[in-house]
Image (tube, rainbow, N blue to C red):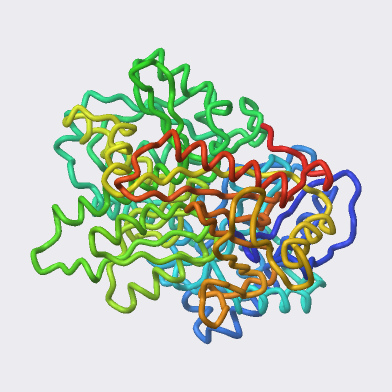
């Protein structure tokens, strides 16, 4: 997840510490214990943002600003995302800026969608997505509908530092109810969003007749109402909601963590309801509904929870197949693009090579995908699909960010179509891999709360056998190439420079092994984690899946033992 500078978090702790900026990471660390302090920090953030936007847009007071929010709330401080949204709006209203403030909680993708539709200068979504209940944050979008990237993030940060004293009126949340500049875009945006969804609906008649049942859980967040409307737009009967998780609950009381990416252990209520209702497919949107997890019951009665990379293979196949079947004869496949972040599966690259369209990689984070997609669209290109492995999917280009609402209904249509061919999602996934080559991947992480330790782990990799030398092997596995996006180094390039732009504020090193495995170690932009991503990419003729899985696991074990050294470095293994 990426907020303003990946993102800004507002966390509630018992012991307040001073406002401080972490210069070595793109995160603003705000620790507060009272509602007054929390309100102060929210106001200061928007004062800086206003100052920067006024500088960038001479027509800022004509174009306005979009504000959305999720259902988070902190009981101890009586503060909620909605209240932070009102404070956000008050800062701008006091300066004469029109504010499009949603009157009800909305999915995160509604904010970037509204920014483009309303031609606003920018917008914010107040959410901490799937993070712990104590967190909250600001996710910032530019006029193009994509999350902000450099230099905007750095310039906004400078402006915030220049505006640490609250302005008159910055705390007057009553302005939201009294100012003629407050506008509610909910009805308009919801209506045109659902109408736009129909552009990626290809089998409406089939959808109306399908006997498939779908279970949907919104994980105590915003998703229920909007996924119901999306299913209606596609002609489906409503999905069956998980009653215990249907309504907003800021405590996320039925799950150990509100992240559907954690798999079957957090989907228990959904899976049990599906078994009771004889439903084969479970759809889970995270609390702000920008990501989607999918599970399918197999013939043996067990559940398969798809990884983000597996879902991307299905989405990529489906969106390209639908483009071919429904496009005009004059449509040029060389004008078509799909994108993925560099730590995600290379399956789209394999499909692109065989089918003739273009595939591009970006740095991790949908802010990079959204900005690149907008550039491609402005140059007359057609983008069908983009994704990041952490269950973030962009189907079509109505929203230039990941969108769990649209992804949910697209996967439902895909499952309904496959049902008419006597195929399940899992069976179709196997067919995709047999056609384009197996891509077996695994992603996980270690927790590390000590920044010096994280730095030491990565600096050792940059000075492995001697200063400024990267490892040539990892255990028994030889390394073919090393790419270090933090420093801008790439041994596979003639000039030794990374094609992806250097990103000094985060740690990320990728190893390409001689056996075909690609593995990346990187830090999280939002959590105290060292993540690893590993994938075996095979040719279509290499169909021994068991062998590939065994090779992948052995490389991962060597990577952990030789590069991460969890016991020596005090790293905490992933657990839910």
| Residue name at image x 57 percent, y 28 percent | 266
Viewed as shown, does residue 114 lie left or right of 429? right
Residue 306 is situated, as x and y percent measured from the top left of the image, at 44, 36
Q: Which one is in front, 166 or 154?
A: 154
Residue 400 in view: yes
171 versus 213 height, above or below: below
Viewed as shown, does residue 76 lie left or right of 87? right
Quadrant including the N terminus: bottom right
254 versus 414 height, above or below: above
Q: How many marks?
A: 0
| Residue name at image x 77 percent, y 57 percent | 457
Q: Which image quadrant is residue 211 in?
A: top left
| Residue that extends furthest to the left in the rendered view of this protein | 329
| Residue name at image x 43 percent, y 23 percent | 303
289 versus 473 height, above or below: above
Residue 180 in view: no
Q: Which one is in front, 488 or 259?
A: 488
| Residue name at image x 23 percent, y 70 percent | 334
Residue 344 is situated, as x and y percent measured from the top left of the image, at 49, 54
Q: Which one is in front, 87 or 148?
A: 148
Q: Which image quadrant is residue 117 in?
A: bottom left
Q: Which image quadrant is residue 283 in?
A: top left
Residue 193 is situated, as x and y percent measured from the top left of the image, at 34, 54
144 versus 201 height, above or below: below
Viewed as shown, does residue 59 lie left or right of 16? left
Residue 67 is situated, as x and y percent measured from the top left of the image, at 55, 60
């Amino acid at each position: 997840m990426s907020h303003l500078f990946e993102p800004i978090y507002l966390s509630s702790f018992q012991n307040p510490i001073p406002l401080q900026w972490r210069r070595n990471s793109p995160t603003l660390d705000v620790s507060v214990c009272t509602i007054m302090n929390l309100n102060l920090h929210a106001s200061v953030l928007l004062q800086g943002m206003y100052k920067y936007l006024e500088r960038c847009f001479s027509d800022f007071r004509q174009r306005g600003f979009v504000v959305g929010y999720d259902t988070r709330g902190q009981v101890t401080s009586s503060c909620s995302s909605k209240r932070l949204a009102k404070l956000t709006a008050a800062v701008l209203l006091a300066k004469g800026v029109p504010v499009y403030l949603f009157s009800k909680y909305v999915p995160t993708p509604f904010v970037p969608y509204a920014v483009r539709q309303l031609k606003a200068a920018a917008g914010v979504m107040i959410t901490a997505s799937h993070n712990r209940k104590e967190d909250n944050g600001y996710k910032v979008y530019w006029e193009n509908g994509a999350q902000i990237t450099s230099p905007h993030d750095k310039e906004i940060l400078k402006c915030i530092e220049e505006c640490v004293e609250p302005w008159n009126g910055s705390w007057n949340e009553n302005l939201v109810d009294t100012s003629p500049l407050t506008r509610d875009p909910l009805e308009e945006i919801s209506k045109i969003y659902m109408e736009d969804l129909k552009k990626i609906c290809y089998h409406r008649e089939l959808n109306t007749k399908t006997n498939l049942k779908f279970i949907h859980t919104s994980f105590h967040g915003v998703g229920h109402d909007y996924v119901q409307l999306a299913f209606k737009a596609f002609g489906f009967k409503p999905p069956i909601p998980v009653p215990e998780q249907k309504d907003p609950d800021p405590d996320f009381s039925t799950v150990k963590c509100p992240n559907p990416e954690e798999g079957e252990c957090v989907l228990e209520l959904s899976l049990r309801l599906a078994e009771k209702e004889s439903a084969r497919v479970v759809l889970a949107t995270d609390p702000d509904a920008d990501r989607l997890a999918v599970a399918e019951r197999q013939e043996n009665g067990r559940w398969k929870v798809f990884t983000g990379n597996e879902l991307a293979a299905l989405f990529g196949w489906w969106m390209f197949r639908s483009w071919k079947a429904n496009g005009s004869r004059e449509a040029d496949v060389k004008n078509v693009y799909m994108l993925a972040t560099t730590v995600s599966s290379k399956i789209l690259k394999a499909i692109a090579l065989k089918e003739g369209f273009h595939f591009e990689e970006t740095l991790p984070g949908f802010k990079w995908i959204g900005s690149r997609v907008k550039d491609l669209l402005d140059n007359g290109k057609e983008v069908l699909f983009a994704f990041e492995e952490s269950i973030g999917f962009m189907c079509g280009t109505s929203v230039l960010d990941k969108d769990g609402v649209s992804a949910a209904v697209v996967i439902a249509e895909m499952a309904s179509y496959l049902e008419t061919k006597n195929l399940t999602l899992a069976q179709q996934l196997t067919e995709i891999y047999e056609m384009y080559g197996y891509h077996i991947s695994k992603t996980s992480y270690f927790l590390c709360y000590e920044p010096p330790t994280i730095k030491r782990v990565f600096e050792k990799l940059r000075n492995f056998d001697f200063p400024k030398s990267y490892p040539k092997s990892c255990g028994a596995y030889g390394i073919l190439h090393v790419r270090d996006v933090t420093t801008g180094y790439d041994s596979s390039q003639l000039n030794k420079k990374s094609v992806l732009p250097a990103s000094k504020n985060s740690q990320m090193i990728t190893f390409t092994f001689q056996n075909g495995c690609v593995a990346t170690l990187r830090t999280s932009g939002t959590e105290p984690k060292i993540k690893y991503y590993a994938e075996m990419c095979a040719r279509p003729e290499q169909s021994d899946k068991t062998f590939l899985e065994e090779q992948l696991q052995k490389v991962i074990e060597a990577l952990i033992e030789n590069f991460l050294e969890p016991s020596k470095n005090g790293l905490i293994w992933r657990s839910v």
